Structure formats: C-alpha cells, structure tokens
C-alpha cells in the first residue's frame, strides 16, 4: 500500500496492489519434492556403491579361501604320506618291545607327536573341504584334562612358571558332541592368549558349567532352547582399553558368536 498526498487538483488517496503467490508456492513445493527425490536417489546410489564394495570384498575373500583350500588339500595329502610312517612304525616297535623297556616312553612320545601332527593335517583338510571333522561324543572335562597333560599344555607351564593354571570342572561330566581336535586347539589358543596377557605372575582359571537357555533367551541368541555346556577361560591380566576392545569386536567378532559356539557345543 502506498499513500499519495493531495494536490491542488487531486485529493489524497491510498494505492494498493496484490501479488498472487499461488504459482510461486506450487513451484516451491515442486522444487522441494525434486530436491527430496534427488536426496533419496543420492543416498540409494551411495548405498548401492557400498554394497558393491562389500560384495567385491566378499568375492575376493572367497577366491582367496578357494586358493587356500586347494593349497591346503595338496599339502595335507603330501603330509599324510609322510606321517603314515611316523605313526605306524612306533606302534609296530611297541608290539615288539617288552613292557619294562626303557624305550617305551620315548617311542610313545614319538607316536603321540605323530598323532598331533595328523590332527594338524586334519585341520588342513577341513579348510580344503569346507567342512568340520567327524563329531564325537566326549566329555568336555576330559578334553581339558588331556590337553593340560599333553606336551603343549606342559610347555605353557614351562614358559610361564609364575602363572597358575587352575581348573573348576563341573562334576556332571559335561558330555558334548564336537570335534575333539578343534576344542583342544581352541583351549590352546585361549590359554596362550591368557598367559601372554599376564604381565608377570598371575592365574588362569578354566571353568566348565552347564546352562539352560529358555525360549526367550534362545530367540535373542538365535539358538535352540535346551542345555548347553559352557567353557570359560579367565586370566588376571590387565584388560584391553574400551576403545581397542570395541574395535576388536567390530572387526573380528561374528554377528552372533554365542550362537556359533552354542551350536558346536550343543
């Protein structure tokens, strides 16, 4: 609105004008819709690019594992031929030696070493075939005792004499269906990492226990409900800083590690 003052031949008056912004509003709404669509398209493009990168990484990993499997299969077959004598001949010698012979312990050690080497070959074949070894029904407590009495378990005590390895085994027996070789290897890795985490003196506690998972907890953990055997290895070493520990979990922990472990120990 504008005011026009009066003059000699014209009275004062107000002049007003109006601007219809309907078309402008429609244009702005159209532009907003186009901008929103473009934003969604850009986000979708970024998502597809990230998905493509992840698929390429998985493809490269699969190709790498395939090549590793082929190599492991060839090495395993060659080692099997070599180990056949290392495992077989000591048994023949034991049959010919008297029970009170001083050589029996040494030959038994050779035989046990050959069997452990055969277990390593079995791991290579597991990688080559993409499947785990044949399962057996064994006592989890027995597997722990056998490992601690093995040369590998004794070596841990020798390397870390100031670290006490204590066991707290469930008296019920804890029978599980598993690959004994792989369970012992898991225990070996856990004990080695625990011993290395302790600065000087300390203790490592190995515990077995039973646990019942109901339907609600089973749904949350993505496992079947029922009874499970739990193997726990706890050391007195210093913990990792939270940032490093979280980064480790994000990089190396599967989506549901408890589900994988629970299925193996069911």
Image (tube, grey):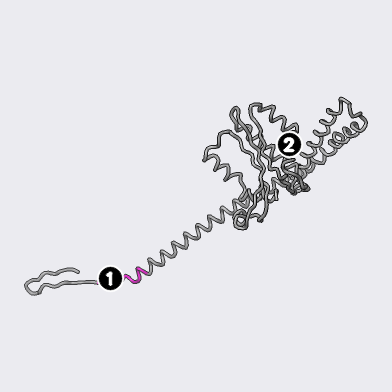
Classify residue 50 as left or right of residue 39: right
- Residue nearer the viewer, 102 or 170: 170
Point out residue 54 in the picture as x, y percentages from the top left corner. 60, 51
**Residue at figure coordinates x 53%, y 58% from the top left:** 44
- Residue nearer the viewer, 171 or 72: 171
Point out residue 74 in the picture as x, y percentages from the top left corner. 80, 42
**Residue at figure coordinates x 85%, y 34% from the top left:** 86
SS assignment at label 1: loop
Start and end of the magenta stretch? Answer: 18-25
Residue tagged 1: 19
Q: Magenta span has 43?
A: no
Point out residue 103 in the picture as x, y percentages from the top left corner. 87, 26
Residue tagged 2: 147
As drawn, 245 above or below 152: below
Quarter in which the N terminus is drawn = bottom left
SS assignment at label 2: helix
Q: Quadrant of residue 27?
A: bottom left
Q: Quadrant of residue 161?
A: top right
Give the Cα distance between marks 1 and 2: 90 Å
Q: Quadrant of residue 78?
A: top right
As drawn, 162 above or below 24: above
């Amino acid at each position: 609105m504008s005011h026009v003052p009066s003059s000699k031949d014209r009275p004062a008056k107000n002049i007003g004008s109006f601007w219809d912004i309907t078309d402008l509003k429609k244009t702005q709404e159209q532009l907003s819709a186009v901008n929103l669509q473009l934003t969604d398209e850009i986000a979708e493009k970024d998502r597809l690019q990230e998905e493509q990168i992840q698929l390429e990484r998985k493809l490269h990993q699969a190709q790498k594992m395939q090549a590793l499997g082929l190599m492991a299969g060839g090495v395993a077959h060659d080692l099997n031929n070599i180990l056949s004598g290392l495992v077989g001949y000591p048994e023949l010698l034991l049959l010919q030696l008297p029970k009170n012979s001083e050589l029996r312990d040494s030959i038994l050690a050779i035989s046990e070493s050959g069997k452990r080497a055969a277990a390593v070959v079995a791991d290579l074949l597991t990688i080559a075939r993409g499947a785990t070894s044949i399962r057996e029904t064994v006592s989890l407590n027995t597997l722990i005792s056998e490992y601690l009495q093995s040369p590998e378990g004794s070596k841990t005590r020798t390397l870390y004499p100031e670290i006490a390895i204590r066991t707290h085994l469930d008296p019920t027996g804890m029978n599980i269906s598993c690959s004994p070789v792989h369970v012992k290897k898991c225990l070996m890795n856990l004990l080695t990492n625990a011993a290395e985490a302790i600065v000087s003196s300390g203790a490592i506690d190995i515990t077995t226990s039973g646990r019942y998972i109901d339907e609600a907890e089973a749904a949350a953990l993505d496992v079947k409900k029922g009874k499970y055997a739990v193997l726990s290895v706890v050391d007195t070493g210093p913990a990792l800083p939270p940032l490093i520990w979280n980064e480790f979990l994000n990089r190396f922990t599967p989506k549901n590690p408890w589900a994988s472990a629970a299925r193996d120990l069911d």
